[in-house]
Amino acid sequence: MEKQIVLNTFLKETGGHIAAQLEACTRCGMCAEACHFYQATGNPEFSPVWKIELLKRAYEQRFTLAGKIRLAVGLAKPISEEEISHFSKIVYEACTMCNKCSMVCPMGIQLGPLIHEVRQGLSNAGVVPAELLAAVNQQVEEGSPLGVTDAVYKSRLEWVADEWEVALPQDVKGADTLVVFSSIELMKFPENIAAIAKILHAAGEKWTLSSQAREVVNFGFYEGNPERTIMFLKRIFDGAGDLGVRKIVVTECGHAYDALRWTSYNLMAVPQGIEITHIVGLVGDYVRTGRITLKKGAHNDGRITFHDACKIQRRGGHIKEPREILNVLAPDSFAEMSPSREQAICCGGGGGVIAIKDADSNRYAAFELKVDQLRRVGAKTVVMSCSNCRLQFTDCVQHFNLDIKVAGLCQMVADALEK
Ligand code: SF4
Ligand code: SF4
């Protein structure tokens, strides 16, 4: 039964553009070298091209003469229920949807989106890791995968406003900008909320939070479930529409930014006339245009490096802004990891991986590549603009007993505000 649903999804989704990509692969292996899970473990099943094997076989066996003949004479196997369960472990537990493989493929095959198609088939059949599915269901029922209900949201914001003595405007009609935090910030890094509020106030931004659009994380997107992805996106767009804002700012969350900024346009009618941007882009503009000024050298104490988040820097293109900011904050101590920018190595915790207990060994193995990078650059502090990465770094710094401070970029900016 599961098998049939997965196959039906693959066959329904396999239009010309996917078929052309499946046909184009030359088996050169370059994508494998780009994948941190493959690099870290050497497991051939973690090579990106293998992660789309089910999709490829379903396509070949249904639509190509060679595939049909191979199947008929026993040279190829039909897809089995066991393989479907096995591939669920591979595409959810050993892929962060970082999209580096797509970037290196010489044939232009968009492996990341194709792996997302595999997740979609598995999601339709309900073959999704239990913890990930539980988080999705919690977001459906309570509005948040981390339990940020209406009451929790309200009390968290009241506490942040008191603790850090910062105003957090809510449901302000006529504001220019809606700011939407992730539940990771709300529950794990509340100081980020205060930091971002301080920056926005310093810049004179007319901004608001929304009690309706209170959570930007999108676990439907991790799952590969279009209906639930749309449901969570709609909450944000409806909140923005009700308040009449002109801009939505996604705070320090990479996958949420991808879902809202690009994926939304492929799934639904996105309201027109609303700009969607990431807080790093906004803060970069503030610094560049003098809307905020920062204390030069405020963080010049010990080697500091920047971790590029796959969805914010590689995909989102916000590569210059963190460098411009860090060259003000830490002109003498900032140094790049290698590789960095769009070539950066993923932290290993995105794409829902950090939510799945069985994926811990993959996640820690992948992070060893980061440990090596951090050691080579001699980092005392590593800074980033994604709270999911920050969660992974915070956990892994403990796991590997590293003497390295993990920081959010907005936090550093807020601490160095001069006006
Ligand atoms: S890099 Fe592209 S062409 Fe080469 S094996 Fe991977 S998917 Fe195929
Ligand atoms: S998207 Fe990233 S994690 Fe997934 S297969 Fe490609 S390189 Fe590996």
Image: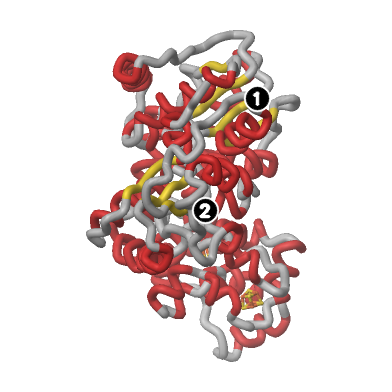
Whether residue 250 appears in this view of the structure is yes
Of circles 1 and 2, which is in front? 2
For marks 1 and 2, the one nearer the N-term is 1
Is residue 199 shown left or right of residue 192?
right
Where's residue 30, x and y in %? 60, 78
User: 35 or 159: which is nearer to us?
Assistant: 159
User: Which residue lies at the image location 51% right of the left edge and 37% below the top edge?
Assistant: 296
| Residue that numbered label 1 is attached to | 247
User: 410 or 123: which is nearer to us?
Assistant: 410
Q: Amino acid at mark 1?
A: Lys
Q: Quadrant of residue 380?
A: bottom left
Q: Amino acid at mark 2?
A: Asp
Is residue 174 shown left or right of residue 19?
left
User: Which residue lies at the image location 35% right of the left edge and 35% below the top edge?
Assistant: 189
User: Which residue lies at the image location 48% right of the left edge and 60% below the top edge?
Assistant: 346
Helix, strand or loop status at disc 2: loop
Helix, strand or loop status at disc 1: strand
Where's residue 237, x and y in %? 61, 26
